[in-house]
Image (tube, rainbow, N blue to C red):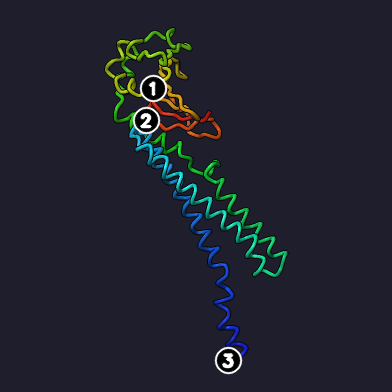
Amino acid sequence: MSDREHTTACNLPHQRAWYARDRTLLIGFVVSYAALFAVLHVFAYLFGLQREPPCWLACMVPALLTLMTMVLLLFLAIRMVRVWRKHIANRRRLRWLRLMAVAAIVIFLVLPFTRFGFPPYRSYTSGFRRYVKANVDLGSMRAWLSTLDRKWCSDYVYDLTSGATIESWWPETAPWAKAITPLDPHSAMLLLDGDGHPAMAITWLGLFSHWGLVVGSEEMRVPPAGFVKHKEYRLALDSGAYVWHRMK
């Protein structure tokens, strides 16, 4: 090996080392952003189970991960502007590399909010379904619904925000409503399903969304899940019953 080749071989690792910090920042950004959504999913599932984590924990952990993500992204942007141009002489190549890096970061940032992502409301709905399965007697609800006159079930809504309970409106519901009342639902509505059988929809209102439980006869068709097409996300409980979540 000639002296020139030896010098080039010795300097090559050093020449390639300038972007190692960018690589570390990018990996840190990806990990922190992914961890942020993982934590949000865990908390959403716990809220769906009605097991609220400590307020300081539910606020502090996402805030710290958000701050870490923003700081890493800021340092990465600074290096893209100031450092890359010192090591990439070809300006056209520099522009394309910056453009591709920015596009990749933007796609990664918005992906969780698209139809290809897995937003936290799905984890909340999964937790809520598990809670309903464990605490609500669907059989008793159906038995009571089967005794109703169909004429009662047309746009018949009971507003529960005044302090009333489901049992106060319908004393016969006491065997199953005790699991619903502590959750402070905002409304309960009697309706007819697609086949004309009595059904019930119970709704809770949140700041940015609302969710609920629909129970009908075992023959009631459960609408397919699909937030984009049907404007709400649904999960079946069993035949003729499902929980749902809708963004405002």
As shown in the figure, which amino acid type bears the numbered disc 3?
Met
**Quarter residue 115 falls in:** top right
In the image, 66 versus 90, the foreground residue is 66
First in sequence: mark 1 vs mark 3: 3
Q: Position of residue 83 (x, y in %)?
A: 62, 65
Decide: is 92 above or below 64.
below
| Vertical side of 102 occupied by 214: above or below | above
Is 115 above or below relative to 238? below
Residue bearing mark 2:
237
Cα distance in 3D space between marks 2 and 3: 73 Å
Q: Residue furthest left?
A: 175
Choose mark 1 or mark 3, whichever is in front.
3
Mark 3 highlights which residue? 1
Check disc 1 and report the residue beneath it: 215
Q: At x 55% / y 42%, what residue is drawn?
A: 114
Residue at image point 44% right, 50% down = 35
Classify residue 234 by image quadrant: top left
**Dot 1, how many residues are within 10 Å of its Cα: few (below 14), some (14-19), or many (20+)?**
many
As measured in the structure, the alpha-carbon distance from the residue carrying label 1 to the one carrying label 3 is: 81 Å
- Judging from the image, what secondary structure is the residue with disc 1 in? strand
Q: Is residue 136 left or right of residue 98?
A: left
Q: Position of residue 177 (x, y in %)?
A: 31, 19
The picture places residue 232, in percent across and down from the top left corner, at 50, 30
What is the distance, in whole Å, between disc 2 and disc 1 at their CAs? 9 Å
Q: Is residue 174 left or right of residue 188?
A: left
Give the residue type at disc 1: Val
Quarter of the image where the N terminus is located: bottom right
Type of amino acid under label 2: Leu
Q: Earlier in the sequence, mark 2 or mark 1?
A: 1
Q: Residues within 10 Å of mark 2 (few under 14, many from 20)?
A: some
